[in-house]
């Protein structure tokens, strides 16, 4: 979605509809969860359906948090587990931002 928005703004700048690119930095989102006691990045449908914890992270390319949403599906999750999910999400977002940069190069 970020790449499409980037391309849209480039198209608008090329036609003088806007004069300045309103995008300030990259943004990407990824899901994480705890499945069978193990933190997992980018759960597939089967894992997500049975996860003990499900979380979504929206982050900037510089590591800023835009949105964090997490749900304990069976039992509460700990702060340590949340921080592990955040660590996984940060790595996943870094990979997504690298792909975004390749796409617009």
Image: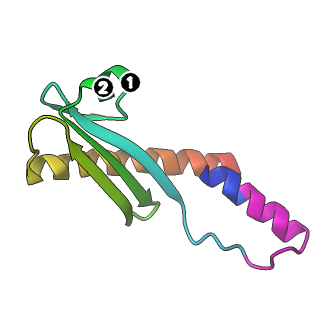
Pinpoint residue 34: horizontal percent, then vertical percent.
20, 34
Q: CA distance from mark 2 to mark 1?
A: 6 Å
- Residue that carries the numbered disc 2 in the rendered image: 49
Q: Residue furthest front?
A: 74
Crowding near the residue tagged with mark 2, few <14, some 14–19, many ≥20 C-alpha atoms within 10 Å: few
Q: Is residue 77 magenta?
A: no
Which residue appears at 61% of the width and 49% of the height?
1
Q: How many marks?
A: 2
Would you say residue 21 is visible in this rendering?
A: yes
SS at mark 1 in the image: helix
Label 2 secondary element: helix
Above or below for 98 versus 43: below
Picture residue at 9% right of the left edge, 38% below the top: 75
State whether residue 19 is above or below residue 42: below
State the residue at coordinates (32%, 57%). 68
Q: Is residue 35 left or right of 30 when viewed as pictured?
A: left
Dot 1 crowding, Cα within 10 Å, few <14, some 14–19, many 20+: few
The reply to whether callout 2 and callout 1 are in contact (CB within 8 Å) is yes
Q: Which residue is mark 1?
A: 45
Which of the two residues, 87 or 105, is positioned nearer the viewer here? 87
Q: Position of residue 76 (x, y in %)?
A: 9, 44
Which image quadrant is residue 33 in? top left
User: Can I make out residue 105 in this image?
Assistant: no
Looking at the image, which residue is at 10% across and 54% down? 79
Work out whether 63 lies above or below 50.
below
Instruction: Answer whether residue 13 is magenta in the image.
Output: yes
Query: As drawn, is 15 to the left or to the right of 5?
Result: right
* Residue most extreme to the right: 15
Q: Whole-percent x and y of residue 17?
A: 86, 73
Q: Is residue 29 left or right of residue 87?
A: right
Q: Which residues are magenta?
A: 7-20
């Amino acid at each position: 979605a970020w790449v499409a928005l980037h391309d849209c703004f480039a198209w608008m700048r090329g036609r003088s509809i806007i004069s300045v690119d309103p995008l300030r930095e990259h943004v990407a989102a990824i899901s994480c969860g705890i499945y069978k006691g193990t933190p997992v990045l980018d759960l597939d449908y089967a894992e997500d359906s049975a996860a003990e914890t499900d979380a979504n992270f929206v982050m900037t390319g510089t590591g800023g948090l835009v949105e964090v949403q997490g749900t304990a599906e069976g039992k509460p999750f700990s702060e340590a587990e949340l921080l592990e999910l955040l660590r996984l999400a940060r790595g996943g977002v870094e990979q997504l931002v690298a792909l975004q940069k390749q796409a617009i190069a």
